[in-house]
């Protein structure tokens, strides 16, 4: 999508989310979003199929970005490292639009329909990295490894992005992600074929580990609606 069109799409989405938060999701019509965005109703539907998509203007383009970064592994760059680098690129793209991230986070906390949609959107990212690892990990890798690694890397990304949103944009999301990915590297001990005994090893009782586990626990509770 051309940059100008993408800017219009983001502007409509951010306007819509502001209205949803101010007036309530059920009370805001597409016509109201169009008026507040100073575009026609037809323009809104040019970019979005329906009201429930207004909070998600970015995922399609970002999935394309992720796909572009999932390049062929090399002798010096393992499939896991490729996925980690691609995940960093995804985080950087999220952070290009911090207000969208913050508004969507607040909105999905109060609108169950949109929260469920966000979970489904996130799964599209995990599906791409899982498929990539399934294709590129050594053929003798344990069958669970693509799912395990893609989920673990995604958990680090979601934890960092959720902390950023909960703090109203005050945390260093990219720094937290990189810290989490380094933690994953330590677990793998440089071997992408590491089996579950290493992943399930006893972890050191340090502030860093406790923060990571607490963040993952909180994220799981939010996903389950606790």
Image (tube, rainbow, N blue to C red):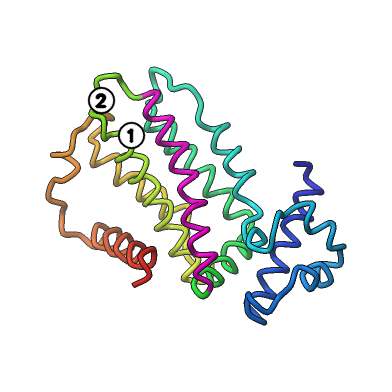
Question: Is residue 40 or residue 9 the one in the foreground?
Answer: 40
Q: Position of residue 163 (x, y in %)?
A: 43, 64
Residue drawn at (60%, 44%), measured in percent from left and top? 62
Q: How far apart, in angstroms, are the residues tagged by discs 1 and 2?
A: 9 Å
Please name the residue that numbered disc 2 is placed on.
141
- State how many labels appear: 2
Question: Mostly what secondary structure, the magenta segment?
Answer: helix
Which quarter of the figure has residue 61?
A: top right
Furthest residue in direction bottom, as rendered:
23
Residue 134, above or below 186: above
Residue 134, above or below 225: above
Residue drawn at (29%, 46%), measured in percent from left and top? 183
Looking at the figure, which quarter contains the C terminus?
bottom left
Q: Position of residue 24 (x, y in %)?
A: 63, 79
Q: Which portion, as a residue range, is magenta?
A: 111-136
Question: Is residue 64 or residue 3 the one in the foreground?
Answer: 64
Question: Is residue 205 or residue 26 the one in the foreground?
Answer: 26
Number of the label disc, if any, that sits on residue 146: 1
Crowding around mark 1 (Cα neighbors within 10 Å: few <14, some 14 to 19, many 20+) is many
Residue drawn at (38%, 67%), measured in percent from left and top? 222
Residue 117 magenta-highlighted: yes
Looking at the figure, which quarter contains the N terminus?
top right
Q: Position of residue 156 (x, y in %)?
A: 38, 51
Number of the label disc, if any, that sits on residue 12: none
Which quarter of the figure has residue 18?
A: bottom right
* 1 and 2 marks in contact (CB < 8 Å): yes
Answer left or right for 203 relative to 24.
left
Residue 132 magenta-highlighted: yes
Residue drawn at (52%, 58%), measured in percent from left and top? 117
Q: Position of residue 176 (x, y in %)?
A: 41, 55
Instruction: Work out whether mark 1 precedes mark 2 in sequence or the reverse, and give the earlier one.
Output: 2
């Amino acid at each position: 999508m051309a940059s100008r069109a993408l800017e219009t799409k983001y502007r409509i989405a951010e306007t819509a989310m502001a209205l949803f938060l101010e007036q309530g999701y059920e009370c805001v019509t597409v016509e109201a979003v169009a008026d507040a965005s100073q575009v026609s109703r037809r323009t809104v539907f040019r970019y979005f199929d329906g009201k429930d998509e207004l909070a998600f203007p970015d995922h399609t383009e970002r999935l394309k970005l992720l796909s572009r970064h999932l390049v062929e592994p090399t002798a010096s760059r393992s499939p896991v490292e490729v996925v980690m680098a691609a995940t960093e690129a995804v985080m950087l793209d999220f952070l290009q639009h911090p207000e969208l991230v913050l508004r969507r986070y607040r909105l999905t906390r109060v609108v169950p329909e949109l929260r469920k949609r966000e979970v489904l959107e996130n799964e599209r990212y995990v599906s791409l990295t899982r498929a990539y690892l399934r294709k590129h990990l050594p053929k003798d890798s344990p069958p669970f490894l693509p799912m395990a690694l893609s989920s673990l890397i995604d958990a680090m990304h979601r934890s960092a992005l959720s902390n950023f949103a909960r703090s109203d944009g005050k945390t260093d999301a990219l720094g937290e992600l990189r810290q989490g990915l380094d933690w994953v590297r330590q677990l793998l001990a440089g071997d992408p074929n590491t089996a579950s005994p290493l992943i399930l090893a006893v972890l050191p009782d340090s502030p860093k580990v406790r923060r990571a586990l607490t963040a993952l626990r909180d994220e799981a509770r939010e996903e389950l609606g606790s």
